[in-house]
Image (cartoon, rainbow, N blue to C red):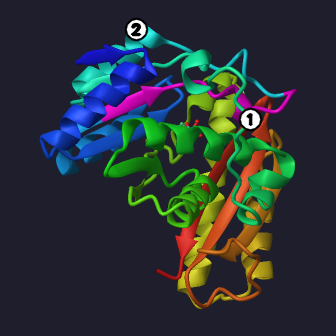
C-alpha cells in the first residue's frame, strides 16, 4: 500500500490510472477507522480497480466549540486497518495540500445543508462539501463511498456531484452496528461506560418506529413521538432532534407515504451521536 502525502503525487497516480483505464474508488475519511469505514473500503475493493482511502481531519467542518483538536487520531492503526481492507493508496494530505495559499472557494448545497444536523452545526456541511469537492477534483474517482449513518451528508454529496456535473457515483453503504445496535462512529470513544450502555437506545427507538410504520402507522408526528418517548426512558440521553423527512429533499413530511428518513441526533455526555432509518422502501 502506497502512502501519499502530496496533492501532486495523488494527481499523478490518478492520471496514470486513467491512462490505464483503471476505475478509482475513493473512501474519504477523517481517520480513527472502524468497521464502518472498512466496509466502505471493502465495497470499493469489490467494485473498483484502484482503492484510495483519504484521511483528512477537516477543520472546516468543525464549529468553534466542537471537537476538532480532540478528534481521535491514530495514523499507525489506521494504516494497518486500511491495508487489511485492501486499500491500494492512503492519501494523507495536510491542510496546506488541500487549501492552497490564498484559497477563497467554498462549495455549498443550499437548503439541504440547513436542516437536521445543519441547524445545530451551522457551517458544518459547507465544510464537508468544500473538502469533498476538492478530494473529488484531486483523486478523480469513478465512485466515492460514504456511510448511510450520515444520511444528510450522503444526500448533500449526491446533490453536489449532480449539480457540479461530476460523474463520480456517490455510493451509500449500510450502517455498521455493534452487537447491541449502536451505530459505529469514531465519536463513540468519547462515551463513558454508562453512556456507552445507554447509547443503543437510539437504535431501539428507531426500530420501534420502524415496526409501527410496518404495522401501518404513517403519521410522522406519531412516529417521531414514539422515538422521543423511547429515548426519554434513558436519562443519560439528551435529544437534539428527531425528524421524519423526505428521502431526497430532506423537507419534513407529515405522512410517511413514499420513502422517508427518520433521523435522530442526541447527546450522551460530550458525544453527539446520530442515527437514522429509511422508511417506506
Ligand atoms: O464523513 C466523514 O468522515 C467526513 O464528513 C468526510 C466525508 C470525510 C469529509 O471530511
Relative depth, front residue between 8 and 211: 8
Whole-percent x and y of residue 255?
71, 89
| Residue 193 falls inside the magenta stretch | no
Above or below: residue 135 compared with residue 254? above
Crowdedness near tag 1: few (<14), some (14–19) or many (≥20) residues, C-alpha within 10 Å = few
Disc tally is: 2
Q: Could one spot residue 245 in this view of the protein? A: yes
Q: Position of residue 21 (x, y in %)?
A: 14, 47
Specify the quadrant of the image occupied by residue 44. top left
The answer to whether residue 116 is above or below residue 182 is: below
Q: Is mark 2 within 8 Å of ligand 1?
A: no
Image coords of residue 182 (percent x, y):
55, 44
Do the CB atoms of the residues marked 2 and 1 lie less than 8 Å apart?
no
Residue extending farthest to the top is 76
In the image, residue 178 lies at what x, y percent?
46, 40
Q: Residue at x 84, y 46 (%)?
A: 122
Front disc: 2 or 1:
1
Dot 2: element: helix
Could you give the CA–CA distance between mark 2 and mark 1, rounded to whole angstroms? 33 Å
Residue 178 seen in this snapshot:
no
Left or right, 243 with reference to 75: right
Q: Earlier in the sequence, mark 2 or mark 1?
A: 2
Q: Which residue occupies the foreground of this view, 180 or 77? A: 77
Query: Which residue is drawn at the image coordinates 80% and 59% (left, top)?
Result: 114
Residue bearing the label numbered 2: 76
Range drawn in magenta: 52-65
**Snapshot quadrant of residue 35:** top left
Quadrant of the picture in which ligand 1 is shown: top right
Q: Which residue is mark 1?
A: 104
Residue 53 in magenta? yes
Is residue 220 placed above or below 24 in the rendered structure?
Answer: below
Amino acid at each position: 500500500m502506497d502512502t501519499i502525502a502530496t496533492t501532486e503525487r495523488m494527481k499523478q497516480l490518478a492520471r496514470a490510472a486513467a491512462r490505464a483505464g483503471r476505475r478509482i474508488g475513493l473512501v474519504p475519511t477523517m481517520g480513527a477507522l472502524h468497521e464502518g469505514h472498512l466496509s466502505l473500503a471493502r465495497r470499493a475493493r469489490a467494485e473498483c480497480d484502484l482503492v484510495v482511502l483519504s484521511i483528512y481531519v477537516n477543520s472546516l467542518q468543525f464549529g468553534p466549540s466542537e471537537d476538532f483538536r480532540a478528534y481521535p487520531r491514530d495514523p499507525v492503526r489506521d494504516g494497518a486497518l486500511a491495508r487489511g481492507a485492501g486499500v491500494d493508496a492512503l492519501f494523507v494530505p495536510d491542510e496546506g495540500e488541500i487549501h492552497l495559499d490564498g484559497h477563497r472557494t467554498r462549495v455549498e448545497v443550499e437548503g439541504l445543508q440547513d436542516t437536521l444536523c445543519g441547524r445545530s452545526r451551522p457551517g458544518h456541511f459547507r465544510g464537508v462539501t468544500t473538502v469533498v469537492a476538492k478530494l473529488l477534483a484531486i483523486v478523480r474517482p469513478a465512485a466515492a463511498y460514504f456511510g448511510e449513518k450520515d444520511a444528510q451528508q450522503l444526500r448533500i454529496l449526491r446533490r453536489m456531484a449532480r449539480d457540479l456535473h461530476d460523474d463520480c457515483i456517490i455510493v451509500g453503504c449500510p450502517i455498521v452496528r455493534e452487537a447491541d445496535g449502536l451505530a459505529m462512529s469514531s465519536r463513540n470513544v468519547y462515551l463513558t461506560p454508562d453512556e456507552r450502555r445507554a447509547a443503543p437506545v437510539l437504535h431501539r427507538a428507531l426500530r420501534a418506529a420502524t415496526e409501527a410504520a410496518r404495522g401501518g402507522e404513517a403519521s410522522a408526528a406519531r412516529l417521531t413521538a414514539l422515538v422521543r418517548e423511547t429515548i426519554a426512558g434513558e436519562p443519560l440521553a439528551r435529544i437534539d432532534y428527531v425528524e421524519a423527512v423526505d428521502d431526497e429533499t430532506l423537507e419534513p413530511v407529515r405522512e410517511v407515504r413514499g420513502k422517508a428518513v427518520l433521523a435522530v441526533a442526541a447527546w450522551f455526555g460530550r458525544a453527539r451521536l446520530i442515527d437514522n432509518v429509511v422508511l417506506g422502501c
